[in-house]
Amino acid sequence: MVLKFKKEIIALLFLIIIFSFVSNISAEQITDNQKNVYFFWGEGCPHCENVKDSGILEEVAKIENVKVYQLEVYNNQTSRELYAKFADELGINQYQRGVPFLVIECQKGYSYFVGDTPIINNLKEAVTNCTPMKEISERVSSDNPNSQALSLGSIIVAALIDSINPCAFGVLIFLLATMLGIASRKRALRYGLIYVLIIFLVYFLAGLGIMKIISEFSGIMNYVIILAGILVFIGGLIEIKDFFWYGKGVSLKIPVKMKPTLEKITKKGTLPAVILLGIIVALVELPCTGGIYLAILSLMHINKTFGIPYLLLYNLIFVLPLIIIVLIAYFGTKTEKIQTMVEGNKKWMRLAAGIVMIGLAFYLLNSVFNWL
């Protein structure tokens, strides 16, 4: 009886060993047949959303031995590094990189697709057959996930340089002088701050509008960035030219024809007139101060650091010198002295703006051509 029991135990152990061996073989086969799908996407990318909404990723994930990884590249450094690794190994040049980008990894090699339509149309077949395939569409968000991050410090510095511009200063000083001549200091303070608030609101809304326009052209974003870079570069050259030869040739300033109209509105000295003045000045001076703003908004889009807090901060810094001018006028400094100070430093303001604009232009163009 004992002998029989021992034989049964031995037989059971033998079966366990055999079963473990078979299980190991099966597991190895599953590993060998494993297919990994890496879907790289960016937050806010419309073409990425097309792929997600199609349901193709969920459909493929149900196939045996298929594992799907969804990797957001704009806000995740690890995902960006993996994106760069795949793009480099697969030989995808800088002009064709973008999201959505999908890579299939299996025994027979790699398949990859760039753009929503190639992914939606080819993914299931490529995963099922595991044959190397590739297709690159122009319908991608061309934002480079590997662009150098746009730091908060660089945004602040650009806003400070942009804020020191004679365009907005001149009208504000004239407004304050008018208010101090016909009303009290308190009224001058109140209307001066209202004027600054209107400038802030118009620039903030303009920034939102520009960002919306940029996002609408995400499919040809490289061309938009190149155009913005060229415009900002030209603007920078004009500003530097004005450091040496102000008034000769083209200058970035409020058109001379607008000055009589602005003076007429200012002299009315009413609240509606001040609000109207702020709106007109903000819109008219955009060509004067908008170069740095356009560059920063474009870089925010490229680097996906754009957000309402950043835009608010930029515009708060932009109007900060205007607030300071209002306050020092309120506390007794004569507007003539402020005007003299502004005029005496005008060319240095333009030089600083020009240098920053050219630097931002190279930054923009480098994000496309990857020079550095």
Image: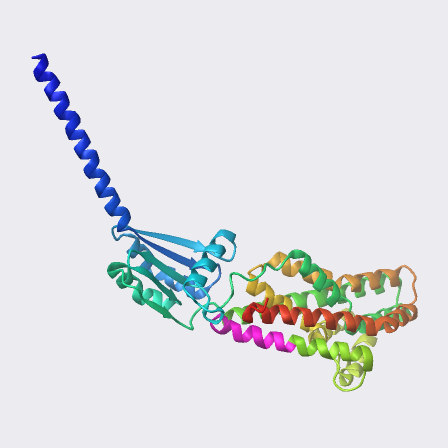
Residue 72 visible to an observer of this rendering: yes
Give the residue displayed 57% in from the left and 75% down from the top: 226
Which secondary structure class fits the magenta region best?
helix
Q: Horizontal placement of 248 versus 81: left or right?
A: right
Give the residue displayed 10% in from the left and 12% down from the top: 2
Looking at the picture, tell me which residue is in the foreground, 256 or 362: 362
Considering only vertical position in the picture, is 82 above or below 299? Answer: above
Name the image quarter holding the N terminus. top left
Q: Horizontal placement of 372 versus 240: left or right?
A: left
Which residue is farthest top? 1
Give the residue displayed 63% in from the left and 56% down from the top: 309
Where is residue 361? Give x, y as percent: 64, 72
- Residue 245 belongs to the span the image colors magenta: no
Q: Horizontal placement of 282 versus 138: left or right?
A: right
Looking at the picture, tell me which residue is in the foreground, 166 or 70: 70
Which residues lie in the magenta part? 217-231
Give the residue displayed 37% in from the left and 62% down from the top: 51
Looking at the picture, tell me which residue is in the foreground, 320 or 59: 59
Where is residue 245? Give x, y as percent: 81, 82
Q: Quadrant of residue 52?
A: bottom left
- Residue 218 belongs to the span the image colors magenta: yes
Residue 76 visible to an observer of this rendering: no
